[in-house]
Image (cartoon, helix red, strand yellow):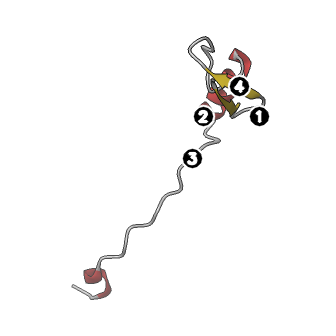
Amino acid sequence: MATVVDCPTCGKKVEWTEQNKFRPFCSERCKQIDLGAWAEGKYSIPAVNPPKDADDDFPH
């Protein structure tokens, strides 16, 4: 039995098989929509501010 996942773009149920060349997407269209979102910068990883260096609190 094949694993079934949700298409990340439209939510349609998709079988995760070698025959589905667009997996995890349901179609070329959904794959291109996702690629376009990456290109436009709609997906990002939040930046974490590094801890302040303890020496910065003291004048040099």
Residue 27: where, in percent of width, then height?
71, 17
Contact between labelled residues 3 and 4, with CB atoms less than 8 Å apart? no
**Chain-order first, disc 3 or disc 1:** 1
**Chain-order first, disc 4 or disc 2:** 4
Which amino acid type corresponds to the residue marked 4 in the rendered image?
Val
Q: CA distance from mark 4 to mark 2?
A: 22 Å
Circle 4: element type: strand
* 34 versus 47 height, above or below: above
Label 2, residues with CA under 10 Å away: few <14, some 14-19, many ≥20 = few
- Closest to the observer, 17 or 43: 17
Q: CA distance from mark 1 to mark 2?
A: 18 Å
| Mark toward the viewer: 1 or 2 | 1
Q: CA distance from mark 3 to mark 1?
A: 21 Å
Label 3, residues with CA under 10 Å away: few <14, some 14-19, many ≥20 = few
Which amino acid type corresponds to the residue marked 3 in the rendered image?
Ser
Residue ID at (72%, 32%): 9
Residue ID at (65%, 28%): 36
Label 4, residues with CA under 10 Å away: few <14, some 14-19, many ≥20 = many
Q: CA distance from mark 4 to mark 1?
A: 9 Å
Which amino acid type corresponds to the residue marked 2 in the rendered image?
Trp
Q: Which residue is mark 3?
A: 44
Tell me the quadrant of the picture where the C terminus can be found. Answer: bottom left
Q: CA distance from mark 2 to mark 3?
A: 8 Å
Q: Which residue is mark 2?
A: 38
- Closest to the observer, 54 or 46: 46
Q: CA distance from mark 4 to mark 3?
A: 25 Å
Along the horizontal axis of the image, is 54 left or right of 43? left
